[in-house]
Image (cartoon, rainbow, N blue to C red):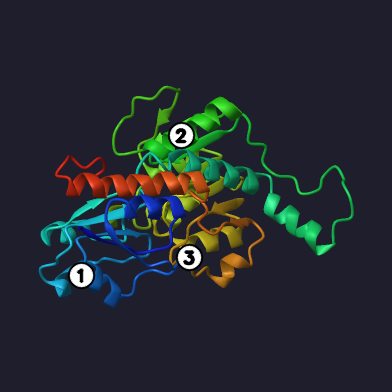
Amino acid sequence: MTRILIARNLPESVVAEARGLFDVTYRDRPDPLSRDEMLEALAGYDGALVTLGDAFGADVFSEAGTPRAKILANFGVGYNHIDVAAAKAAGLMVTNTPGAVTDATADIAMTLMLMSCRRAGEGERLVRSGGWQGWHPVQMLGLHMSGKRVGILGMGRIGQAIARRCHFGFGMEVAYASRSEKTLDFPATRCASPEALAAAVDVLVVSVPASPETHHLVSAGVLAAMQPTAHLINIARGDIVDEAALIAALEAGVIAGAGLDVYEHEPRVPEALLALENAVLLPHLGTAALEVREDMGRMAVANLRAFFAGEPVPNPV
């Protein structure tokens, strides 16, 4: 029977489904695979279901030699923790789980937008501290989101879901920057560059995939182009934003606030960022709903099933 490693703890229904199809070894732990565990995954199994943090770099494939494993089924849409070219050169297919994460990630973007613009995190801390002295007309004035202009940096599946929520739900104008012109079911203006987009919007949402090309795409220059009343939201990957430049911009009032679900060196968050009242910080909650994680798991298992059945794989990368 085909041997599969499930590398991280997953919803019980997903593990049960995988066990009905394969000989499963279940590593029921939240921490990423160590280097030795990654090498064992490649040498001792026919395939592995892995996720964010399981860093299958080119050096791992090089050390593994000719692996037994033929597929890495990634649990998640982002796969920048896997060197796909090196995996393919070693004879492995890599798959992911797009679609299942779209709406949940877009919802977290909206959560962060509202929390940052309306200073919700700061307000909750005030109440919990016991320092709130009651309502008054100019207390904690934030940015009214309705009718403002949102900029989507990366108008893919998730970017479009965010833009729809902004346009149809909040009456916001939509602008975007992407590698190509998009055919959309809502009005949107394409900007020529991230800097041009940043200069034109009240809220800038980062929604591009992580890759060497997008590393620090949101640079000090992009942040400097933003309006001082504007907010930055990142629900993509942490290293797309130059975190040091963002901290400097928030400290200096170059921008009004930021809402982050991801960080450049996860799970480490700089003390300087933790100290900022104008930063809303979530612990990578983008897809953290049981039904969403179950959908992601079923999609990963479906990729494995199709691969070993000799059928077209639904979601190759």
Q: Mark 2 and mark 3 in contact? Answer it, CB < 8 Å.
A: no
Q: Quick one: which residue is furthest to the bottom in this view?
A: 36
Q: Position of residue 259 (x, y in %)?
A: 56, 52
Q: Position of residue 179 (x, y in %)?
A: 29, 39
Image disc number at residue 123: none
Question: In this rendering, is residue 156 above or below 69?
Answer: above
What element does badge 2 sit on? helix
According to the image, label 2 marks what residue? 161
According to the image, label 3 marks what residue? 244
Q: Earlier in the sequence, mark 2 or mark 3?
A: 2
According to the image, label 1 marks what residue? 44
Identify the residue shown where x is 85% and y is 42%: 137
Q: Earlier in the sequence, mark 1 or mark 2?
A: 1
Question: In this rendering, is residue 101 above or below 173?
Answer: below
* 91 on left or right of 302: left
Going by the numbered disc 2, the residue's amino acid type is Ala
Alpha-carbon distance for marks 1 and 2?
Answer: 40 Å
Identify the residue shown where x is 85% and y is 56%: 132
Dividing the picture into quarters, in which one does residue 80 lie?
A: bottom left
Q: Nearer the viewer, mark 2 or mark 3?
A: 2
Q: Earlier in the sequence, mark 1 or mark 3?
A: 1
**Mark 3 residue crowding within 10 angstroms, few (<14) / some (14–19) / many (20+):** some
Going by the numbered disc 1, the residue's amino acid type is Gly
What element does badge 1 sit on? helix
